[in-house]
């Protein structure tokens, strides 16, 4: 089976399926909460015009997912893959946000585990680039087993990102 940037994945809690243009309004109902973005490098992403640009980027990436609560069939967030520009053995998971009603670990861990498990079938490293001030996301990635690139014994500094203020967390096969 070949790697796909947009497989449909599911478990007992979550369905991850490719994000489509018609998902905009339902996803914006989640994204319009300013508290979701308060630690984000783009804290005004809750504004509709700003979110439209983010959503367009997600659709154009052909690697974005709608995160769906399986019990209600409601979109509760979004995430996406990005192939690493620096290494063919790494893929990034990012651009993730989740309705505050689902914060607290269970749902985030559930869908990220789906993505990580799938990605590690094809790549040696899964990357998470997290804003240096986004302590909530840093904590969540650490709970998944992510380590800062400079904390690893093996030199993976070539995977460090140039994005201003981003920390690179790595999960390895």
Image (cartoon, rainbow, N blue to C red):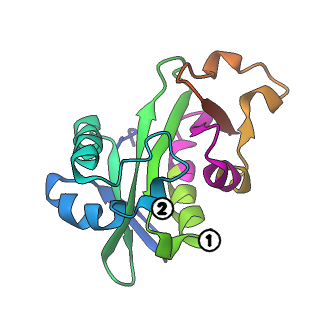
Query: Helix, strand, or loop for circle 1?
Result: loop
**Residue behind mark 1:** 104
Where is residue 66? Give x, y as percent: 33, 59
Closer to the camera in the image, 124 or 111: 111
* Disc nearest the viewer among 1 and 2: 2
Is residue 16 visible in this depiction of the protein?
no
Closer to the camera in the image, 147 or 47: 47
Closer to the camera in the image, 9 or 74: 74
Determine whether, in the image, residue 10 is placed left or right of residue 105: left
Q: Is residue 24 above or below residue 173?
A: below
Q: Are marks 1 and 2 in contact (CB under 8 Å)?
A: no
Quadrant of image for the C terminus:
top right
- Of marks 1 and 2, which one's residue comes earlier in the chain? 2
Q: Quadrant of residue 169?
A: top right
Highlighted range, magenta: 116-140
Determine whether, in the image, residue 37 is placed left or right of residue 54: right
Residue 73 shown in magenta: no
Determine whether, in the image, residue 8 is placed left or right of residue 21: right
Determine whether, in the image, residue 141 is placed left or right of residue 112: right
Where is residue 137? Give x, y as percent: 61, 51
Please tell me how crowded label 1 is: few (under 14), some (14-19), or many (20+) other residues with Cα within 10 Å: few
Q: Residue furthest right?
A: 153
Q: Quadrant of residue 97?
A: bottom left
**Residue behind mark 2:** 35
Is residue 79 visible in this depiction of the protein?
yes
Q: Is residue 51 above or below residue 22?
A: above
Q: Is residue 67 above or below residue 155?
A: below
Quadrant of image for the N terminus:
top left
């Amino acid at each position: 089976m070949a790697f796909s940037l947009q497989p449909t994945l599911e478990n007992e809690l979550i369905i991850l399926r490719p994000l489509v243009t018609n998902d905009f309004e339902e996803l914006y109902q989640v994204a319009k909460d300013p508290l979701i973005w308060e630690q984000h490098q783009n804290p005004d992403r809750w504004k509709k015009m700003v979110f439209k640009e983010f959503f367009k980027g997600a659709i154009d990436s052909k690697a974005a997912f709608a995160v769906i609560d399986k019990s209600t069939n409601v979109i509760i967030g979004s995430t996406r893959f990005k192939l690493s520009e620096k290494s063919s053995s790494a893929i990034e998971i990012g651009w993730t946000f989740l309705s505050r009603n689902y914060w607290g670990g269970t749902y985030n861990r559930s869908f990220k585990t789906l993505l990580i498990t799938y990605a590690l079938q094809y790549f040696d490293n899964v990357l998470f680039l997290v804003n240096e001030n986004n302590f909530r996301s840093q904590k969540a990635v650490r709970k998944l087993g992510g380590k800062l690139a400079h904390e690893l014994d093996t030199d993976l500094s070539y995977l460090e990102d140039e994005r201003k203020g981003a920390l690179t967390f790595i999960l390895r096969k």
